[in-house]
């Protein structure tokens, strides 16, 4: 059995344990679904960071993403996984997540640059929950877009964390100059915070990574990333 296939099996097991732990928190310890959903969102995002170094094969990544997409679709159909699906709002975020992970992996695989994978996925995994938590804790500057209310405080929290993450990844992983990395981080953070602000019903799981990749495409294509 190849090392990559073995790693895929290990990761599949870890993902299942993660889902099981979220169900335990929800059913046994009465943790609210909004919190268990964010716990799964953040944890799965961090676990997918292991795909490029430990799985590498696009077919194996497709197998993982497709498997969990099937599990999530089945849970919706039969009213299962309350820790993820038990929120009191309409959202398609959980369904879009494995799709966008595979899409980002294929972009990374085509370009051979880790930043094309790590930046969009980490911004989605970390900054999106940060915006929600900050917005609820400090609900300053409420605004409404297409009937969906968000806060300037949440958007600011998103922007700051996204800028720091992007800068660190561009300098440490991408090995770009500090000046280029800082300016690129500002562009990426601005695009992704706008995507988060105008998206609802879970579509930010698609628009946030897509906007990050789009900015990286432009910066790379026009020779800005040096």
Image: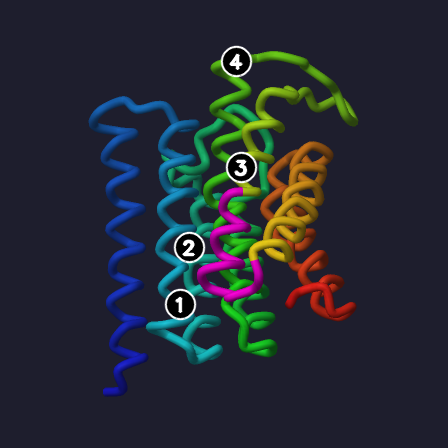
Residue nearest the viewer, comparing 28 with 38: 38
Whole-number angstrom distance, CA of label 3 to CA of label 4: 15 Å
> Main structural element of the magenta stretch: helix, strand or loop?
helix
Q: Position of residue 89 (x, y in %)?
A: 57, 27
Residue position marked by numbered label 2 in the rendering: 71
**Residue annotated with mark 3:** 128
Alpha carbons under labels 3 and 1: distance apart: 21 Å
Give the mark, 2 or 4, whose residue is nearer the N terminus.
2
Horizontal arrangement in the rendering, residue 148 relative to residue 111 (left or right): right
Which residue was labeled with disc 4? 138
Decide which of 117, 22 is in the foreground and name it: 117
Question: In terms of sequence position, does the residue under pointer 4 or pointer 1 come before the other?
Answer: 1
Q: Is residue 108 above or below residue 139?
A: below
Mark 3 in CB contact with mark 1 (< 8 angstroms): no
Q: Quadrant of the N terminus?
A: bottom left
Which mark lies nearer to you, 4 or 1?
4
Q: Nearer the viewer, mark 3 or mark 4?
A: 4
Magenta-drawn segment = 164-177
Q: Nearer the viewer, mark 2 or mark 1?
A: 1
Instruction: Name the quarter where the C terminus is drawn.
Output: bottom right
Q: Residue at x 26, y 82 (%)?
A: 3
Quarter of the image where one finds residue 216? bottom right
Q: Earlier in the sequence, mark 3 or mark 1?
A: 1
| Residue 120 to residue 3: above or below | above
The CA distance from mark 2 to mark 1 is 19 Å
Reading the image, the residue beneath label 1 is: 51
Left or right: 135 in relation to 46: right
């Amino acid at each position: 059995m190849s090392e990559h296939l073995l790693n895929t099996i290990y990761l599949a097991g870890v993902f299942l344990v993660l889902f099981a732990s979220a169900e335990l928190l929800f059913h046994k310890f009465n943790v609210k679904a909004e919190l268990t959903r964010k716990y799964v969102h953040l944890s799965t995002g961090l676990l997918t960071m292991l795909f490029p170094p430990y799985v590498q094969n696009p077919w194996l990544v497709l197998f993982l993403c497709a498997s969990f997409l099937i599990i999530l679709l089945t849970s919706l159909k039969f009213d299962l996984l309350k820790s993820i699906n038990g929120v009191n709002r309409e959202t398609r975020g959980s369904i879009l997540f494995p799709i966008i992970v595979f899409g980002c992996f294929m972009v990374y695989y085509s370009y051979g640059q880790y930043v094309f994978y790590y930046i969009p996925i980490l911004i989605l995994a970390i900054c999106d929950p940060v915006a929600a938590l900050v917005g609820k804790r400090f609900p300053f500057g409420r605004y409404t877009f297409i009937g969906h209310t968000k806060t300037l405080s949440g958007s600011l929290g998103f922007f700051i964390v996204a800028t720091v993450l992007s800068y660190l990844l561009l300098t440490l992983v991408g090995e770009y100059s500090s000046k280029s990395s800082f300016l690129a981080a500002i562009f990426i953070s601005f695009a992704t915070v706008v995507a988060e602000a105008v998206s609802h019903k879970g579509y930010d799981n698609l628009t946030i990574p897509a906007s990050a990749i789009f900015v990286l495409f432009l910066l790379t294509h026009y020779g800005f990333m040096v």
